């Protein structure tokens, strides 16, 4: 297997995407999508098991992270959910991959969910880490409980100019704090954090982060080409592809519900729903075995 830090590049209509490409190129492709504020290093424990099982494993850096850059220096740095999902489709098409499996968490799970909804013919199976992650970006959301709103402090912060300056000047401090509070039972070493931290120095990281959180709260416009897609997603369409939902038992956002009803409704093709012990928000880092096992199970059906 290649060095996990090795990077290849492929151009899509919008991006020059940096990505890891591991295993047998003739193997069935599995795409692993990281989220905010993480990078592809989150998958380092997942990749070897999948390669050993014969799969080709792809770990792209999403827009605004690591070596991934925009082709047009003057293009607006936008990152609504539909754009992140389109990047997945564009990436697969640029590589000549017609069908693949997906696993993602945070933004990556959102992109995976949307790809499965809009292009089910491309997605053989999906591991949804955190469950259904599609947002309604066309209607103002109702206020949540005080605890839920407190958990999302960073989103409101990024909707302010103070948040912009803070992310520009203190991004490592903010990100390390989010890592530790979202996975409170896990100890992140300086070595692990420093391995991922260069990804956050991408020149587009701040603008991409701000636009994503401002757009989802209707405080920034999105790309015109995605207006229809966002209206479609606002209805919360189900995910029909075979899926396994993984939820971290120790998430800093609160313990997941034991009731599977909501996941069953959102994923009519649900194969299994698992609450994973010893894992917080960054589940692939803490329990990579749970992720690789779920993917291998789905692809072996």
Image (spheres, rainbow, N blue to C red):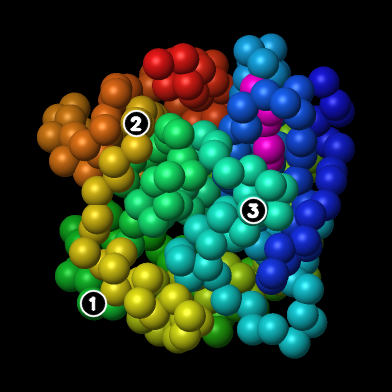
Q: Residue at x 74, y 71 (%)?
A: 70
Q: Residue at x 30, y 45 (%)?
A: 239
How many numbered marks does the figure carry?
3
Relative to the observer, which residue lies in front, 251 or 62? 62
Residue with the mark numbered 3: 93
Q: Secondary structure at mark 2?
A: loop
Residue 57 appears left or right of 1 = left
Q: Are marks 3 and 2 in contact (CB under 8 Å)?
A: no
Q: Quadrant of residue 40?
A: top right
Quarter of the image with the N terminus in it: top right
Q: Which residues are magenta?
A: 55-60
Disc 3 residue crowd, few under 14, some 14–19, many 20+, Cα 10 Å: few
Q: Residue at x 52, y 67 (%)?
A: 83
Tag shown at residue 193: none
Q: Position of residue 197 (x, y in %)?
A: 75, 49
Q: Position of residue 148 (x, y in %)?
A: 27, 55
Disc 2 residue crowd, few under 14, some 14–19, many 20+, Cα 10 Å: many
Residue with the mark numbered 1: 139
Residue with the mark numbered 2: 242
Q: Give the distance between the C-alpha atoms of the residues marked 3 and 2, in whole angstroms.
A: 22 Å
Q: Secondary structure at mark 1?
A: loop
Q: Give the distance between the C-alpha atoms of the residues marked 2 and 1, in whole angstroms.
A: 29 Å
**263 lies above or below 23:** below
Does 56 appear in magenta? yes
Q: Residue at x 79, y 54 (%)?
A: 10
């Amino acid at each position: 297997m290649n060095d996990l830090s090795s990077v290849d590049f492929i151009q899509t209509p919008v991006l020059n995407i940096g990505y890891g490409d591991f295993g047998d190129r003739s193997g069935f492709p599995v795409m692993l999508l990281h989220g905010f504020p993480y990078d592809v290093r989150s998958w380092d424990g997942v990749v070897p098991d999948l390669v050993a099982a014969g799969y080709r494993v792809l770990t792209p850096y999403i827009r605004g992270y690591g070596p991934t850059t925009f082709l047009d220096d003057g293009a607006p740095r936008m990152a609504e959910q539909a754009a992140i999902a389109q990047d997945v489709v564009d990436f697969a098409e640029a590589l000549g991959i017609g069908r693949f499996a997906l696993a993602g968490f945070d933004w990556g799970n959102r992109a995976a969910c949307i790809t499965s909804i809009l292009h089910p013919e491309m997605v053989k199976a999906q591991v949804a880490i955190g469950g259904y992650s599609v947002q309604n970006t066309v209607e103002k959301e109702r206020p949540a409980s005080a605890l839920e709103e407190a958990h999302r402090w960073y989103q409101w912060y990024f909707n302010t100019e103070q948040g912009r300056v803070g992310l520009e000047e203190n991004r490592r401090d903010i990100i390390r704090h989010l890592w530790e509070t979202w996975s409170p039972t896990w100890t992140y070493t300086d070595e692990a954090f420093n391995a991922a931290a260069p990804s956050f120095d991408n020149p587009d990281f701040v603008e991409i982060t701000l636009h994503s959180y401002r757009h989802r709260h209707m405080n920034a416009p999105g790309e015109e080409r995605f207006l229809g897609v966002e209206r479609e997603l606002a209805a919360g369409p189900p995910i029909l592809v075979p899926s396994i939902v993984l939820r971290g038992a120790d998430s800093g956002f609160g313990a997941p519900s034991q009731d599977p009803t909501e996941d069953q409704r959102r994923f009519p093709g649900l194969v299994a729903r698992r609450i994973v012990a010893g894992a917080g928000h960054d589940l692939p880092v803490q329990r990579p075995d749970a992720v690789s096992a779920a993917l291998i199970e789905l692809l072996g059906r």
